[in-house]
Amino acid sequence: MDETDDLHPQDNEQHSYVLVTGANSGLGFAICCRLINEFISSRPTFECLTLIITTRDFNKSGDTVKRLERHLERQSRELDAPLKHRISLQPEHVDLTSLRSVQTLSARLLGNLPRLDTIICNAGYGGFTGIDWPIAIKETLTDFFTSLTYPSYKLSTTGETTAAQTGSRNPNLEDGKSQEDEPPLGKVFASNVFGHYLLSHQLIPLLSASPDQGRIVLISSIEPLASHFNPADIQGLASSKAYESSKRLTDIIGLTSTLPSTKPFVQRFLTPAPTTPPQPISLLDNEPLACTRGSTPDTPPQLISLSDNEYRLPKNPEPKIYVSHPGICATSIVTLSLIPFFLRILAFYIARWLGSPWHTVSAYKGACAPVWLALADQDELGDIEQSDGKGKWGSVCDRMGHERIMRTVVEGWGLGGRMGEGDVGDKVGSRRDFQEVTREDREDFAELGRECWREMEGLRVAWEERLRQE
């Protein structure tokens, strides 16, 4: 018997399944704790939760399970009620910079889960190497709030790539240096965006089986600006702001996922992979086709354009894609020595006390928005987007540390991608230099979304085919 069989005693609408990547520390661990707490407090006692937690190795996995079990025991004592029968923990392992590892996890979950209600794409990698202290001190003294919310002084590597994804690379070459038959794959891009993108696509059959429509919750950041992202360098390999570039891409993908311009590509992403190998796909999305998809033994497979409108409609309701961020948390994504670390926390508290809503400081408070997106009623989420447009949901705090959710202004999109929102620079928590989104801005953002979705689907298909042939 598979070791996870006893985790799923029933398959009905009273049992929820949530996957959290990068669950061993920081925001990921806080999301798991908050999911447990809010599920217990908001759901009837007959409802159960299986929490699938992913880490990169067995040691981290075992430690994470033990800490979550201790958290569950504390909750049981506080509520004076047994909770272990309601919460099941299922540890899994995945390295999002290894596409083989992503495929292995996908195959395992497809084989032992009846469905998946939510994926929270939390795991990430910053690629940061330190702080430019002269600039940091100058910005903090001259523009305190901006320096602590949209810092420009973080130093990071440029052009960092993953190890070889296939065996086609020359073993004598260093990791990240490939032969011509395997293109480079950015490490920050793979960890923050592409690994999750591939994992989510491969788990579409489980997400589509959710009775409340599956959800893909993308974790972004408050930091990314339009200037951080270059669509010609979607992986951020040439950027000194690879982390911010990956988070801007996350915003673009999530916010444009329901637009007509991106529909052909989003449909393919949200359509379960066929059981037979797909035909080659052309990246020329506006190339007219003079042939059909079909092939016979006498006719080789034909190219399919990515903008071809003959996509296969999924039988079940499509999963929904949401974007969130934790505000400004004191995590270890940027390595600091002890004194600067605590000075940073103090500065965050001062910013909050002076009125900044984004400085949640603690990861538990930062988990407010993603957990809300995972557990909120689907009708509630649908009604909000219907009335206010699709938004980026952030965790915020008042001066006393009471957390809540709030929409975040995204450059070029605004709060909900709609006209008439006013000067978004006047909105609470917005950068002062953000301007009202014009029709031209909105059209440019939609076109950028179409370009990014097209490129992401092209990369997915190309890498899946490359791995299939290995």
Image: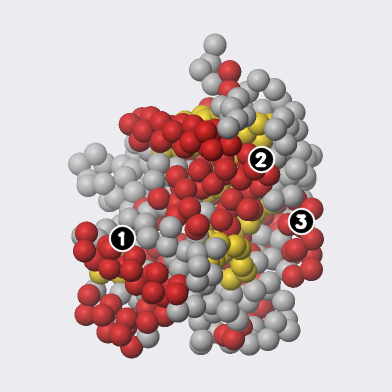
Vertical order, 196 against 115 (above or below) = below
Side (left or right) of 419 relative to 120: right
Question: Which residue is identified by label 2?
Answer: 117
Element assignment for label 3: helix
Disc 3, disc 1: CB below 8 Å? no
Element assignment for label 1: loop
Element assignment for label 2: loop
Identify the mark nearer the N-term, 2 or 3. 2
**Residue 334 has which mark?**
1
Identify the mark nearer the N-term, 2 or 1. 2
Q: State whether residue 460 appears in this view.
A: no
> How far is disc 3 from disc 1 in space, using C-alphas?
36 Å
Question: Which residue is identified by label 3?
Answer: 380
Identify the mark nearer the N-term, 3 or 1. 1
Crowding at mark 2 (Cα within 10 Å: few <14, some 14-19, many 20+):
many
Q: State whether residue 60 appears in this view.
A: yes
Vertical order, 433 against 410 (above or below) = below
Side (left or right) of 316 relative to 400: right
Q: Residue at x 51, y 43 (%)?
A: 32
Residue 119 position in % (x across, y down):
58, 44
Nearer to us in this view, 24 or 346 = 346
Q: Residue at x 76, y 56 (%)?
A: 380
Q: Amino acid at mark 3?
A: Glu
Q: Assign the N terminus to one quadrant of the image.
A: top right
Location of residue 265 by image quarter: bottom right
Q: Assign the C terminus to one quadrant of the image.
A: top left
